[in-house]
């Protein structure tokens, strides 16, 4: 739990750790709104498109071995980001960070799942979900504190000693395991990578170049075509990185689509609100992070309890309630947001959002892992994390595009004018996620086990047990 939990925390933390540092990065390195979006999406996009490949590499060449490789790449890229002298170098280092995280992150969940007895798996995954959820949501506070009291470079330097400490622990405390016969899907990786990059690139640059410009249209249309080809590939290929047949399971379909939508609304909102507190309210980076604690700190308090509730009640009611509360929180903040808005008026939206985030994070991982066979858990973990990261990248791009179309950085009022419609869209997307989550079967899962698979799904191949001393 220690090795996988800390590694998962680092990978999840770097999703949004730069958000409260963006004004400082902009002042130090320069850059437009599009550049600032890429400091976030450079990480989330490579993280997303390579996650499933990372899981497959671990299955084929050894999960511990690839976990160590990913941790090494992530740690080295963190040092490169801290040393970046320009915005382009920072974005490039963030992209390499995403490569390391994509190899490392899916293997943390697979190793943990195999190491915990079935009767305690839901609670253990709930704790893991709380850790990673807190890392994602706590990124603005940690990034803001380091930026204000040290410098923005320290949000990346922080990873280096932790990574160096984890490397020997991972080497000697995790037991090697693999899935014999695992295959790499290079065509699928190329299709999904090209498709997502085209769409995100088009969205990020739409306001600067115009929605009807050739680069934007090529990115959006070409990316969509490539993603459709990826779906087709996953339906007909012999060993695709993401078998589309998994989506025939209502639980797998519901939780994964809901996760994508949840992260779209949440990531985009955090990207804007972490700057709202500084640009509109005039808080320092640390003060902004502290005032977001009712939202960002809630997973630490509520998620472990939500994990236990999901074991007793099933994942659907907890996930749906969490998503509904998150949508309500964003809606309340959008309804009241204005320059000079007192903090007391901001609290209800922050608290509702925090409760919702906590209730969602804890059971989501358990629902994913219980919806597939043990031999497919590596693929399922990679798929869920990938879709969440895709949602995050799209959220920053979509809500950033709305913000740029309706407002800007020129004044507090201009920033508010752009933030409010973006938050309403974020709230609507998360509300849609709650509706999709209703597709998850309502029956209580077997205690410590997983629901029976539907007929027609082939039996799993023999797999070495993935034990680990965590």
Image: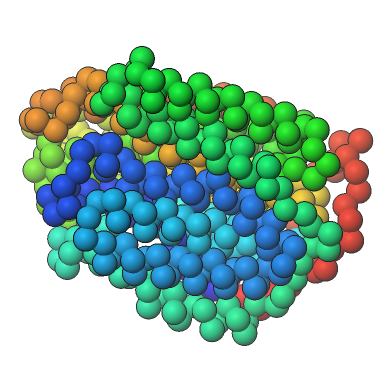
Q: In the figure, is residue 92 to the left or right of 226?
A: left
274 and 366: which is toward the camera:
274
Q: In the figure, is residue 437 to the left or right of 165?
A: right
Query: Percent position (x, y) of residue 70?
Result: 54, 66
Residue located 44% across and 47% down the image:
44
Could you tell me if residue 111 is visible in this image? yes
Q: How many discs appear?
A: 0
Instruction: Tell me which corner region of the image, top left, top right, bottom left or bottom right, holds residue 300.
Output: bottom left
Residue located 65% across and 77% down the image:
174
Query: Percent position (x, y) of residue 278?
Result: 14, 44
Residue located 83% across and 68% down the image:
464
Residue located 77% across and 51% down the image:
376
87 and 264: which is toward the camera:
87
Could you tell me if residue 441 is visible in this image? no
User: In what quadrant of the picture does the C terminus appear?
Assistant: bottom right
What colouring does the structure picture have?
rainbow
Query: Percent position (x, y) of residue 426?
Result: 38, 28
Q: Most extreme residue toward the top, as rendered?
A: 212
Query: Percent position (x, y) of residue 210?
Result: 30, 19
Q: Where 39 sits versus 89, above or below?
A: above
Q: Where 268 sits versus 177, above or below?
A: above
User: In what quadrant of the picture does the N terminus appear?
Assistant: bottom right
């Amino acid at each position: 739990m220690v090795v996988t939990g800390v590694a998962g925390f680092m990978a999840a933390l770097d999703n949004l750790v730069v958000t409260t540092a963006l004004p400082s990065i902009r002042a130090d390195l320069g850059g437009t709104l599009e550049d600032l979006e890429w400091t976030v999406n450079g990480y989330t996009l490579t993280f997303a498109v390579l996650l499933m490949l990372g899981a497959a590499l671990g299955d084929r060449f050894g999960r511990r071995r690839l976990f160590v490789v990913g941790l090494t790449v992530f740690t080295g890229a963190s040092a490169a980001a801290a040393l970046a002298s320009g915005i382009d170098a920072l974005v490039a280092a963030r992209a390499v960070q995403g490569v390391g995280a994509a190899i490392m992150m899916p293997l943390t969940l697979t190793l943990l799942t195999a190491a915990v007895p079935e009767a305690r798996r839901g609670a253990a995954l709930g704790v893991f979900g709380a850790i990673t959820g807190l890392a994602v949501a706590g990124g603005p506070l940690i990034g803001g504190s380091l930026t204000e009291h040290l410098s923005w470079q320290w949000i990346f330097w922080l990873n280096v000693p932790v990574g160096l400490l984890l490397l020997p622990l991972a080497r000697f405390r995790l037991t090697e395991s693999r899935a014999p016969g695992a295959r790499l899907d290079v065509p699928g990786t190329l299709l999904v990578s090209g498709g997502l990059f085209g769409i995100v690139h088009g969205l990020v640059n739409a306001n600067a170049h115009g929605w009807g410009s050739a680069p934007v249209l090529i990115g959006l249309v070409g990316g969509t075509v490539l993603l459709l080809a990826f779906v087709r590939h996953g339906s007909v290929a012999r060993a695709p990185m993401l078998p589309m047949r998994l989506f025939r399971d209502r639980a797998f379909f519901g939780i994964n689509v809901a996760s994508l939508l949840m992260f779209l609304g949440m990531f985009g909102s955090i990207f804007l609100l972490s700057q709202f507190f500084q640009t509109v309210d005039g808080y320092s980076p640390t003060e902004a992070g502290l005032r977001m604690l009712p939202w960002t700190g809630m997973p630490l308090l509520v998620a472990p309890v939500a994990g236990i509730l999901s074991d007793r009640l099933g994942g659907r009611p907890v996930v749906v309630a969490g998503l509904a509360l998150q949508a309500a929180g964003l809606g309340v903040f959008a309804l009241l947001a204005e320059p000079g808005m007192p903090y007391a008026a901001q609290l209800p939206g922050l608290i509702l959002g925090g409760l919702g985030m906590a209730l969602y994070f804890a059971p989501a991982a358990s629902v994913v892992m219980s919806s597939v066979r043990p031999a497919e858990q590596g693929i399922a973990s990679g798929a869920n994390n990938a879709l969440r990261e895709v949602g995050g990248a799209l959220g920053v791009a979509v809500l950033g595009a709305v913000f740029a179309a309706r407002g800007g950085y020129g004044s507090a009022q201009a920033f508010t004018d752009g933030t409010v419609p973006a938050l309403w869209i974020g709230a609507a997307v998360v509300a849609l996620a709650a509706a999709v989550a209703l597709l998850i079967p309502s029956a209580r899962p077997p205690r410590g086990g997983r629901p029976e698979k539907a007929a027609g799904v082939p039996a799993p191949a023999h797999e070495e047990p993935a034990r680990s001393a965590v």
